[in-house]
Amino acid sequence: MGIAQRARSVRASRHSASIRTFAPAATIKCDGPSIFRSQVARDTACLLDVNPAVVSWHCMPVSLDCGNVAHVPDFGIVNYDGGRMLIDSPDRALPIDANGIAAAAETAGSHYRRLLADEVYEGTRLQNAKDLLRYGGAVLALGDRLRMLAVLEEHGNLTIAECLTVFVETKPVAGLAQMILRGFVEVDLDTELLGPETMVRRIRT
């Protein structure tokens, strides 16, 4: 594939994504500009932000040479074990079959896969992630963070309702959402929608 043709293909892919905006606006682990090709891609990124195995992710990370076409995956991911992966969202129309893209990714030093729709939309994790990311731009006061960690240290696991009473400087729901998103505490995102009785646990590093 010629250099000029590749450049045009990459520019077209990135331009088509950059002119669109999708909710929620906040991101936590995104390294670089957050530009999404579709709402499905944005939904996929929400799950990356609440995946404890993911250190960081970036949008449209690399152009893969797939013979006569270039393919720019939706996301590049860096995991805590140092592994790197390129992924496409379930709605992505691929220029060639996924095995061919995976082979090109291997040549570039990465693994590749196209997610299934069930991996994004099955269960409550996505809705819980989007609910938390609504508060992704909030500022968590240091005093509230220290108070919350101290209370959990003293009393062990608490319900969300109990945790909300601890916040003084930050709006309670925003403060707790920040502590979950930033990895200070954890909740079960998969069993049911977050509620007053959902248990909150301190994460020990």
Image (spheres, rainbow, N blue to C red):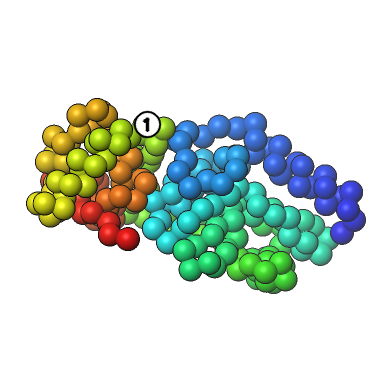
Q: Mark 1 belongs to which amino acid?
A: Ala
Question: Left or right of 157: which side holds 24?
Answer: right
Q: Quadrant of residue 15?
A: top right
Q: Residue at x 24, y 28 (%)?
A: 169
The image shows residue 61 at horizontal and vertical percentages of 65, 52
Q: Is residue 74 above or below residue 116?
A: above
The quadrant the C terminus occupies is bottom left
Left or right relative to 43: residue 98 = right
Residue placed at 30% from the left, 33% from the top? 141
Residue 9 or 169: which is nearer the viewer? 169
- Tag count in the figure? 1
Residue that appears at 46% across and 52% down: 48
Q: Label 1, secondary structure: give it.
A: loop
Which of 172/61 is in front?
172
| Residue 185 horizontal/vertical position (percent) | 27, 50
Would residue 149 be visible to someone looking at this image? yes
The image quadrant where one finds the N terminus is: bottom right
Q: Is residue 134 above or below residue 63?
A: above
Q: Residue at x 37, y 31 (%)?
A: 138
Question: What residue did someone put label 1 on?
Answer: 138
Instruction: Say if 1 sits above or below 150 in the image.
Output: below
**Crowd rating for badge 1 (residues with CA inside 10 Å; few <14, some 14–19, many 20+):** some
Q: Please say whether residue 89 is visible from this viewpoint.
A: no
Residue 65 spot, x, y in % from top left? 78, 61
